[in-house]
């Protein structure tokens, strides 16, 4: 149960595992290079043809470094790992919310507003997505309004034709001009989108 809550709360995306693996690889690489730089002079002194006193001193230095180096590296690695998880959460949390918005938009729901936590990263992307959804919402609203008016006028014209026998050509042309104007308005709104 605790693992499930941890995964649901902290592990949002499988990409977190990939980024964590890269960070661990970098830490291990830094650890190997640091260890080599720190222990190599002592190892060189041990295997060289130096007097036994100097070799004994090198062995003592190596043991002392060994005692101090590994616990320090372990503590630093744990701190970096925990810090990385918190940083991931500030990046992948907003990405999870963005994906939710993208799915909502793909399903036609433009009413959802995006809001990420105060200390999350990707604030400029949040603003850009909010502007995109607001623009889409405005354009679709205009299209819906024009479509509603067009439908209303078409029904009115149909009713007028069915009920009135003496509809003049001028009246019919006026009604058709109104419908044509609405179609033109819809066309203008649709040109906002490129497909």
Image: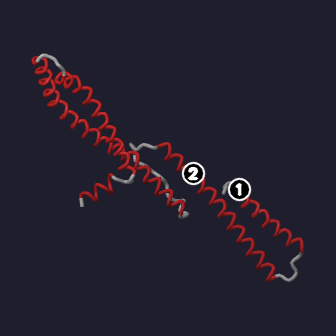
Q: Is label 1 in a helix, a strand or a loop?
A: loop
What residue is drawn where x is 24% and y is 30%? 35
Is 34 left or right of 70, judged from the image as shown?
right
Using the image as rendered, state which of residue 161 and residue 51 is in the foreground.
51
- Going from N to C along the chain, the mark reached first, 1 or 2, is 2
Task: Find disc 1 in the rendering and name its residue.
Answer: 191
Q: In the drawing, what numbered circle is on residue 40?
A: none
Q: In this view, does 23 lie above or below 5?
A: above
What residue is drawn where x is 27% and y is 29%? 34
What residue is drawn where x is 85% and y is 83%? 165
Which image quadrant: the C terminus? bottom right
Give the x, y percent position of residue 164.
Answer: 83, 81
Which image quadrant: the N terminus? bottom left
Give the x, y percent position of residue 72.
Answer: 20, 33
Q: In the drawing, what numbered circle is on residue 132?
A: 2
Q: How many labels does the image show?
A: 2
Quarter assignment of residue 75: top left
Q: Is label 2 in a helix, a strand or a loop?
A: helix
Quarter assignment of residue 187: bottom right
Using the image as rendered, state which of residue 192 and residue 138 is in the foreground.
192
Give the x, y percent position of residue 88.
Answer: 36, 45
Using the image as rendered, state which of residue 82 and residue 30 is in the foreground.
30
């Amino acid at each position: 149960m605790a693992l499930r809550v941890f995964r649901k709360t902290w592990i949002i995306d499988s990409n977190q595992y990939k980024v964590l693996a890269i960070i661990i690889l970098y830490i291990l690489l830094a650890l190997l290079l640091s260890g080599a730089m720190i222990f190599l002079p002592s190892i060189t002194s041990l295997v060289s043809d130096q007097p036994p006193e100097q070799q004994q001193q090198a062995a003592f230095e190596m043991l002392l470094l060994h005692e101090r180096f590994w616990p320090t590296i372990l503590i630093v690695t744990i701190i970096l790992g925990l810090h990385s998880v918190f940083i991931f959460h500030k990046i992948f949390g907003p990405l999870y919310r963005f994906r939710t918005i993208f799915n909502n938009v793909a399903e036609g729901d433009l009413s959802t507003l995006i809001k990420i936590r105060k200390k999350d990263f990707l604030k400029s992307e949040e603003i850009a997505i909010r502007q995109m959804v607001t623009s889409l919402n405005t354009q679709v609203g205009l299209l819906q309004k024009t479509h509603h008016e067009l439908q209303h006028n078409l029904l009115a014209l149909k009713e007028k034709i069915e009920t009135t026998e003496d509809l003049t050509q001028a009246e019919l042309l006026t009604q058709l001009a109104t419908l044509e104007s609405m179609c033109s308005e819809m066309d203008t709104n649709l040109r906002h989108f490129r497909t």
